[in-house]
């Protein structure tokens, strides 16, 4: 097998700035040891997120010039509408400025006190919108999905037995919808199988509950199905995606992921009455139904991005480049969530730094060291992001301490990824020298964005 190459050539480049280790030490200290507070230009390789960081194609940039900025009935809307319908087959498509805006509209209407929602794992903005409406959200990912070191093909699957128990407990009439996040972002970008989607659909049919997809990474999920699920090896990714959506009553999507754009999203659904209510709310919060918080040029870029994302050379390169980084790290003994997911590698900080307790933020320590060592920006997904306090003020840590290295789409080449692997391995090899951290400032909510830290003495 020959090397899988980037299925594009580069027409326009953006220089990256090099800094010295001494400069990075000063910059990180000034940022309170929180890389969210470092200026992007002081980052060499930015793996903070894959959201809105994609490189657009020449065709997408051409679409930007074609954007029809008519307030109502824009031509770009009709292209966007057709592109989303081709993949999802949904009756109504409502553009929004991001995925969370689609969630806000949907859960404002369906949520409220006394309602319950279930998913494999709700993404944090989805959960926040459910809770903001006064409802509660519950996660039922399969057991293997909770164990970073265990390999399985579809670790994003829903535990259907647990789901059914939950429905019987809460009453189907109190559950406005069930959601599958594909791929399961918060669970390591792990895919959901077609069989699992079908099983969840059957339960939804039995109890007459609508099924929605959080479809941010639908193409990556479809590619995993093609590669791993029997019976799909000869189907196209587009056909697989169409089948996935055929089992759903609706979908929310952040176009900042698998539509290869820098801003945008949508809500797609089949229920006419619900669609009318959603559109009415859209007009108050986002805009007229044919632009919904986006410019015509954005709609144009999304329509083109949705054509490009199902290209199998692209997906082969995409999934392989994440796996390639994962393989290099595994070979060097670095503990990660296995197998590598679709959009990111997650370092398992508990096994990486077993000597640093959650109260001293082991994943934050790795994040800091990756910046110092190589100018790489990653994100902590552990006690800083999800830690809570008990009534005596002691930390209640979340189940996992992770560092996410999210790979922006079409942005970095194989040598950038080789460099990332070298830096992570270098940090791993001197893990005994990494310090713990003390939290010195935290905001009341979403503290990870603005938190500040001090270094504790080296162990
Ligand atoms: C990013 C994301 C969202 C929210 O989308 P935004 O465009 O950031 O508002 C929802 N669900 C999943 C799985 C995501 O990854």
Image (cartoon, rainbow, N blue to C red):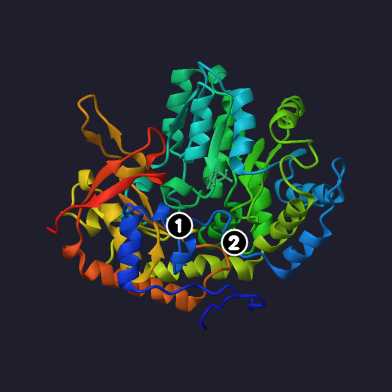
Tell me if 145 is positioned left or right of 226 in this view. left
Label 2 residue near ligand 1, CB within 8 Å: no
Point 32% across, 52% down: residue: 32
Give neighbour class at mark 2: few <14, some 14-19, many 20+ (Cα, 10 Å). many
What mark, if any, has residue 192 been given in the picture?
none
User: In the image, ligand 1 is in what quadrant?
Assistant: top right
Q: Is residue 425 left or right of residue 163?
A: left
- Write down the residue under mark 1: 48
Q: Secondary structure at mark 2?
A: loop
Above or below, comparing residue 26 to residue 2 in the picture: above
Mark nearer the N terminus (1 vs 2): 1
- In depth, the one of 238 and 102 nearer the eye is 102
Whole-percent x and y of residue 382? 32, 46
The Cα atoms of the two marked residues, 1 and 2, are separated by 13 Å
Residue 52: quarter of image: bottom right
Q: Residue at x 55, y 70 (%)?
A: 317
The quadrant of the image that shows the C terminus is bottom left
| Residue 281 placement (x, y as % from top left) | 71, 27
Q: Is residue 367 visible?
A: no
Q: In x, y percent, where is residue 108?
A: 61, 25
**Which secondary structure lies at badge 1?**
loop
How crowded pointer 1 is (Cα within 10 Å; few <14, some 14-19, many 20+) is rated as: many
- How far across and how far down the image is residue 152, in percent? 39, 55
Q: Which residue lies at the image location 59% right of the left edge and 65% below the top edge?
A: 315
In the rendered view, does 132 fall on the left or right side of 244?
A: left
For label 2, the residue is 54
Which of these two is toward me, 218 or 417?
417
Q: How many numbered discs?
A: 2
């Amino acid at each position: 097998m020959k090397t899988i190459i980037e299925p594009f050539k580069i027409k326009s480049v953006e220089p990256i700035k090099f800094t010295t280790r001494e400069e990075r030490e000063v910059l990180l200290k000034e940022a309170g040891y929180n890389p969210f507070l470092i200026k992007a230009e002081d980052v060499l390789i930015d793996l903070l997120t894959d959201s809105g960081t994609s490189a657009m194609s020449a065709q997408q940039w051409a679409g930007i010039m074609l954007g029809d900025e008519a307030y109502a009935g824009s031509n770009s809307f009709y292209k966007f509408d057709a592109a989303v319908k081709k993949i999802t087959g949904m009756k109504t498509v409502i553009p929004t400025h991001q995925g969370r805006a689609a969630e806000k509209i949907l859960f404002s209407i369906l949520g409220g006190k006394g309602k319950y929602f279930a998913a494999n794992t709700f993404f944090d903005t989805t959960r926040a919108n459910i809770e903001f409406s006064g409802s509660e959200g519950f996660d039922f990912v399969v057991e293997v999905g909770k164990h970073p070191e265990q390999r399985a093909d579809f670790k994003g699957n829903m535990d259907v037995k647990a789901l059914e128990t939950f429905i019987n407990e809460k009453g189907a009439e109190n559950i406005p919808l069930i959601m599958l996040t594909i791929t399961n972002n918060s669970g390591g970008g792990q895919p959901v199988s077609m069989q699992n989607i079908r099983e969840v659909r059957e339960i939804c049919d039995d109890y007459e509950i609508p099924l929605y997809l959080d479809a941010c990474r639908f193409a990556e999920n479809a590619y995993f199905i093609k590669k791993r699920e029997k019976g799909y090896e000869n189907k196209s990714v587009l056909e697989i995606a169409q089948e996935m959506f055929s089992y759903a009553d609706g979908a929310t999507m952040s176009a900042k992921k698998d539509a290869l754009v820098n801003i945008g999203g949508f809500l797609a659904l089949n229920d006419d009455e619900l669609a009318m209510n959603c559109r009415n709310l859209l007009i108050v919060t986002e805009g007229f139904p044919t632009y919904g918080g986006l410019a015509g040029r954005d709609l144009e870029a999304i329509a083109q991005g949705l054509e490009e994302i199902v290209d199998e050379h692209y997906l082969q390169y995409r999934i392989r480049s994440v796996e390639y980084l994962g393989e290099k790290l595994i070979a060097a003994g670095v503990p990660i969530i296995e197998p590598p997911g679709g959009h990111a590698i997650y370092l398992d900080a508990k096994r990486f730094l077993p000597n640093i307790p959650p109260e001293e933020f082991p994943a934050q320590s790795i994040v800091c060291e990756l910046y110092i060592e190589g100018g790489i920006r990653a994100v902590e997904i552990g006690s800083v992001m999800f830690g809570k306090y008990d009534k005596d003020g002691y930390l209640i840590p979340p189940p996992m301490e992770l560092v996410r290295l999210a790979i922006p789409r079409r942005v970095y080449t194989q040598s950038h990824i080789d460099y990332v692997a070298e830096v992570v391995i270098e940090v791993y090899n001197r893990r005994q020298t990494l310090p713990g951290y003390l939290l010195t400032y935290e905001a009341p909510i979403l503290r990870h964005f603005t938190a500040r830290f001090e270094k504790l003495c080296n162990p």
